[in-house]
Image: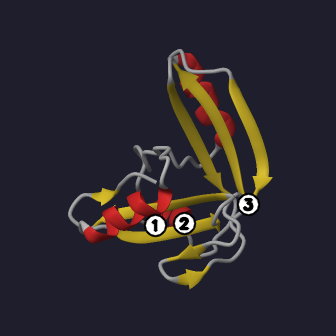
């Protein structure tokens, strides 16, 4: 979820049984990143990670106005689920499968062989698995 205030969002989620939360502040997790095909600038965030059973809830407070998937969500007024994440054994195969099936890369980040992630979206359905 993209949230305007991480501490208030954590208090809300704890109130419905999610937590404890691991909190990172003023971090820029998207290194070596491209946003909509252009090299991305710094995107500092406050992030809280909590669990409800096996499901991770990620709360993201953007601290920047740099063009990014996070500032785009704020501009588009996306207040619900921002993305779903899945871990895969073969990132390139899954990535190209998504692209071959109507998805577009919104964010590409990471280093091949070390760790990669992407946000992909389908213009018919919005942001999809990252």
For the residues labelled 2 and 3, the Cα–Cα distance comes to 14 Å
Residue that carries the numbered disc 1 in the rendered image = 75
Q: Which of 24 and 128 is in front in this view?
A: 128
Whether pointer 1 and pointer 2 mark residues with C-beta atoms closer than 8 Å, the reply is yes
In this figure, which colouring scheme has been used for the structure?
secondary structure
15 on left or right of 98: right
Residue 29 higher or lower than 24, as above or below? below
| Number of residues whose C-alpha sits closer than 10 Å to that of mark 2, classed few (under 14), some (14–19) or many (20 or more) | some
Name the spot of residue 127 as percent of width and height, x first.
36, 58
Q: Nearer the viewer, residue 90 or 39?
A: 90
In the rendered view, does 72 fall on the left or right side of 50? left
Looking at the picture, tell me which residue is in the foreground, 70 or 119: 119
Contact flag, marks 3 and 1 (Cβ < 8 Å): no
Instruction: Provide the residue designation for mark 3.
Output: 28
Residue highlighted by disc 2: 71
Q: Which residue lies at the image location 77% right of the left edge and 55% below the top edge?
A: 27
Identity of the residue drawn at 73% across and 60% down: 28
Question: Residue 90: where, in percent of width, then height?
Answer: 48, 54
- Where disc 2 sits, the SS reads helix
Precedes in sequence: disc 2 or disc 3: 3
- 116 to 68, vertically: above or below: above
Calculate the distance from the C-alpha at mark 1 to the C-alpha at mark 2: 6 Å
């Amino acid at each position: 979820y993209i949230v305007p205030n991480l501490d208030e969002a954590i208090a809300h989620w704890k109130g419905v049984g999610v937590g404890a939360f691991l909190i990172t502040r003023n971090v820029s997790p998207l290194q070596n990143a491209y946003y909509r095909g252009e090299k991305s600038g710094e995107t500092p965030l406050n992030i809280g990670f909590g669990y409800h059973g096996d499901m991770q809830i990620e709360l993201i407070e953007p601290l920047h106005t740099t063009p990014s998937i996070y500032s785009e969500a704020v501009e588009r007024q996306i207040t619900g689920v921002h993305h779903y994440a899945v871990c895969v054994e073969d990132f390139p195969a899954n990535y190209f499968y998504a692209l071959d099936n109507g998805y577009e890369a919104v964010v590409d980040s990471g280093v091949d062989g070390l760790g990669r992630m992407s946000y992909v979206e389908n213009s018919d359905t919005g942001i999809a698995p990252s």
